[in-house]
């Protein structure tokens, strides 16, 4: 029900629809968020897999909590990446033409893994505002740390529209 409050990044829905029909491109969600919520989103149909923290259900089938043993950790993100590679008939260290898009420090281990195994790590930011707010300052600090550590290959706006920098990166690396 909360999906009506989500404002997706520009062009993301069109991009997902378009790439779903392309046999060379597969999209996955890898998130610390609630898996069942993500699976219930309208855009879930465009993903080849969704990885997240599962919820627990009571005897009436109602959500009763979070499965604390299955919370997505840094180590689990790497495990999920290896699972995705395996499902695509790749060695667990072959990230050639794999692009990981992240927007925060919790993405560091996954970006590091992808980058160090031949893939591309893209740090996305929200559209530039006239006045930098605390979130954008914090996000820039995170990016600077990740870039200094050699983890990030590109930084761009989270804009999936035709002609955007992100769209060019994604098509260049996956076609």
Image: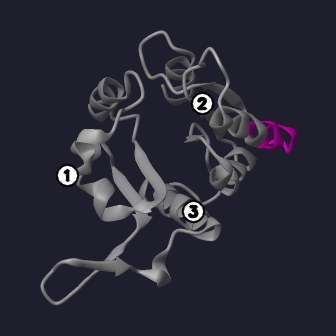
- Whether residues under marks 1 and 2 lie with C-beta atoms below 8 angstroms apart, the answer is no
The quarter holding residue 168 reads top right
Residue 114 % position (x, y)? 65, 48
Could you tell whether 50 is left or right of 45 in the image? right
Q: Does the magenta stretch include residue 146?
A: yes
Marks 3, 1: nearer the viewer? 1
- Whether residues under marks 3 and 2 lie with C-beta atoms below 8 angstroms apart, the answer is no
Per the image, the residue denoted by label 2 is 125
How far apart marks 3 and 1 lie (CA) works out to 27 Å
Residue density around tag 2, few if under 14, some if 14–19, many if 20 or more, within 10 Å: some
Per the image, the residue denoted by label 3 is 77
Q: What stretch is highlighted in magenta?
A: 143-151
Per the image, the residue denoted by label 1 is 1
How far apart marks 3 and 2 lie (CA) works out to 21 Å
Q: Which of marks 3 and 1 is nearer the N terminus?
A: 1
Residue 25 % position (x, y)? 40, 35
The secondary element bearing badge 3 is classed as helix
Instruction: Name which residue lies at 35% across and 26% down.
Output: 15
Instruction: Name which residue lies at 52% across and 27% down.
Output: 158
Residue 96 % position (x, y)? 61, 41
Residue 70 % position (x, y)? 47, 78
The secondary element bearing badge 2 is classed as strand
Marks 3, 2: nearer the viewer? 2
Instruction: Name which residue lies at 40% across and 22% down.
Output: 10
The quarter holding residue 65 reads bottom left
Q: Is residue 55 above or below residue 154?
A: below
Residue found at the far top of this picture: 163
Tell which of 21 and 126 is nearer to you: 126
How far apart marks 1 and 2 lie (CA) works out to 26 Å
Marks 1, 2: nearer the viewer? 1
Q: In this view, does 81 lie above or below 7?
A: below
The secondary element bearing badge 1 is classed as loop
């Amino acid at each position: 029900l909360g999906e009506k409050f989500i404002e997706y990044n520009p062009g993301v829905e069109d991009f997902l629809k378009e790439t779903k029909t392309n046999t060379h491109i597969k999209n996955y969600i890898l998130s610390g968020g609630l898996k069942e919520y993500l699976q219930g989103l309208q855009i879930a149909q465009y993903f080849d897999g969704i990885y997240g923290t599962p919820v627990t259900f009571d005897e009436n089938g109602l959500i009763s909590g979070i499965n604390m043993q299955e919370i997505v950790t840094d180590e689990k993100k790497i495990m999920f990446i290896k699972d995705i590679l395996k499902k695509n008939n790749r060695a667990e260290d072959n990230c050639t033409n794999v692009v990981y898009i992240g927007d925060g420090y919790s993405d560091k281990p996954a970006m590091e893994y992808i980058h160090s195994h031949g893939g591309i790590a893209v740090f996305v930011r929200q559209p530039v505002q006239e006045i930098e707010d605390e979130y954008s300052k914090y996000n820039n600090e995170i990016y600077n740390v990740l870039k200094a550590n050699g983890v990030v290959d590109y930084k761009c706006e989270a804009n999936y529209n035709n002609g955007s920098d992100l769209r060019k990166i994604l098509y260049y690396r996956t076609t």
